[in-house]
Amino acid sequence: MRKRELMPAALLLALSLTLTGCGASINTITETAEGLVNEVLSDSEAEDSVTIIEGTATPTTYFSAKEDAGYVAYAEDATKITLSGDTATIDGEGASLSSDGTLYITADGEYVLSGSYSGTIAVECTGEKDDVTLYLNGVTLTSTDYAAIVCYSADNLILSVVPGTENTISDGSSYTLKTQEDNTDAAIFSKSDLTINGSGSLTVTGNYNNGIVSKDDLLIVETSLTVNSVDDGICGKDSVEIQSGEITVNAGGKGIEATNEEDAEKGFILVTGGTITVNSTDDAFHAVNVIQVDDGKLTVSTQDDGFHSDSELVINNGTIRISDSYEGLEGNVITINGGSIELSSSDDGINVAGGNDASGTAGNFGQDAFETDSSCVLTINGGTILVNAKGDGLDSNGSIVMNGGTVTLEGPTDSANGSLDFGLSFDINGGTFLVAGSSGMAQYPSDSSTQHSLIYYLDSNYAAGTSVILTNANGEEVISFVPDTAYNFVIISIEALKEGETYTLLCGSDEMELTVDNINNIYGSGAGMGGFGGMGSRGRMNGEQPQMNGDSTDGSGQRPEMNGEMPEGTDGEMPERPDGEMPEGFDGERPQGGGRGGFGPGAGSDSEG
């Protein structure tokens, strides 16, 4: 569903394929000698089983992690600064206390801070290659009218959190800016590269606007870091890189972002490890260029997008769980090579749409692009992906390609969205693809796929928790899963499907016999004309359509109510087309299966009923 609407923030959806919820376990699909069967893994087991079917492509890598960024203990000759109230005792060179209560660091070197201080620590070095390391050795820094730590000039500012210590930093709720050009807006603000390392604890509170800001590159290693902010939590203009540590961000705006849109090689986020939890009102992760996740455990709850890139989003590995989002993953190009992904969304689960993010802050959402765009590509090469979406499950303005991995789409349950929504094509060449959702706006894989699919427009609505089981001609289970949503439309595409063989689909106690004769094998009385716009099969028009508003499971099969009236200007008769004439612009070719709307299930279909 393309149009953005304000959705409630506290809408928690169950993410597991069983009825136990997302916290206890996740489902994966594993291969046995008898076929593919459902297996429930614990969280710890799932992290070791992130790729069920190997992808055919080499994992995409845009950025490499910086080296030698970890904590190094300070030297004996480091300058020692003991803080107390609005004063400081300085033992060493390079630091001084001004009359206005600002503690200035003006020389390259190491500075060890301890105690409590009400004021601002300002780094202002003249050398272009000056590196300043501030060791936080159990400090409480509080500023009432400005940033607590600000770096005006240096090559690198390093905040080293001494192991075994607890440190807190907060700014004022209003600022007295130094000059008219002063753009300081965070409790920790640096105009230079900023590194935060060391395994101690650091809590940062941004009362004025943001928590931590670097106008250059921002790197986080090892630290137990908590950021609470009125607006954005962690921002690196050129980049944000997280290698390790335990990071929690509670943000009234975006959680973690990179903002440089002037340089194509900047404005990126790279996560190579760590445990990261983000609770945000705006996007949890937002980059104007690339977001790349190589590893780590990432947990997200947001009122907007979980991960949003204006350009490319690449997931190579790691564990990603998005319990709440407007849209889970969004970018112009999305590539998933591995990892374990569970997401719940009030609109689209994974959305590939051209252009910059159209959403605003504080829930003031805009509208996504709607036009078909060949540059929009979702590629799935591996990993396990579970999507529970109230909008479209996988949505691409262009194409979708699946070469491996396991994808399970649960929902939607309303007729205005579909588990699949693509503008050009969806090719399945490998992996395991499972769908249980609404038939109202349903699409299915393209005939250009190389892996067989079974598509069934069911005649009844099945309640959430009703199992889907596929058995072979010998009665052996080939695959099974238990959707957490109501459904009347199913897709099963697995490597085990063989042309010419017959299978039995069981939905609850109902059995349907299916034969694989084509790439797309379409069954059910609903595989007819329906929907609006585009090409291909979209909905049901051969009689009665199951009502799928909300979670209805009464199987009434009634069409939407129209108050007993036909649209204005009709007399109850279907209009006749002049003999021998086709619709304007029709070239005589049958639409490809899997598009929107149209007049049938598509070429090469196997429709019954």
Image: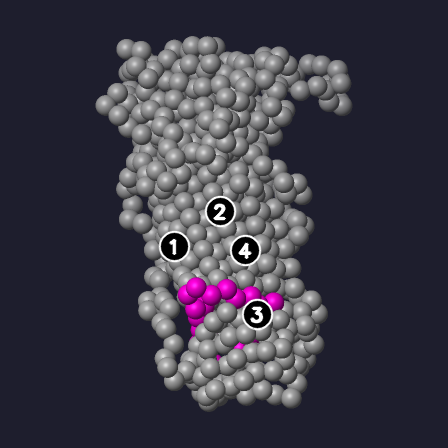
| Residues at marks 4 and 2, CA–CA distance in whole angstroms | 10 Å
Q: Are marks 3 and 1 in contact (CB under 8 Å)?
A: no
Q: Secondary structure at mark 3?
A: strand
Any mark on residue 249, and which? 4
- Name the residue type under label 2: Thr
The first of marks 4 and 2 along the sequence is 4
Q: Is residue 166 magenta?
A: yes
Whole-percent x, y for residue 41 in the image: 37, 33
| Residue highlighted by disc 2 | 299
Q: Residue at x 63, y 43 (%)?
A: 9
Residue at (53% x, 29% y) in the render: 411
At horizontal 64% and vertical 73% (from top left) the residue drawn is: 143
* Front-lying residue, 163 or 61: 163
Colour scheme employed for the rendering of this structure: one colour
- Other residues around mark 1 within 10 Å, as few (<14) / some (14–19) / many (≥20): many
- Residue type at mark 3 is Thr
Is residue 37 covered in magenta?
A: no
Q: Which residues are magenta?
A: 149-170
Checking the image for residue 9, the label placed there is none
What whole-number distance in Å separates the C-alpha atoms at marks 1 and 2? 13 Å
- Horizontally, residue 60 falls left or right of residue 211, namely left
Residue denoted by label 1: 273
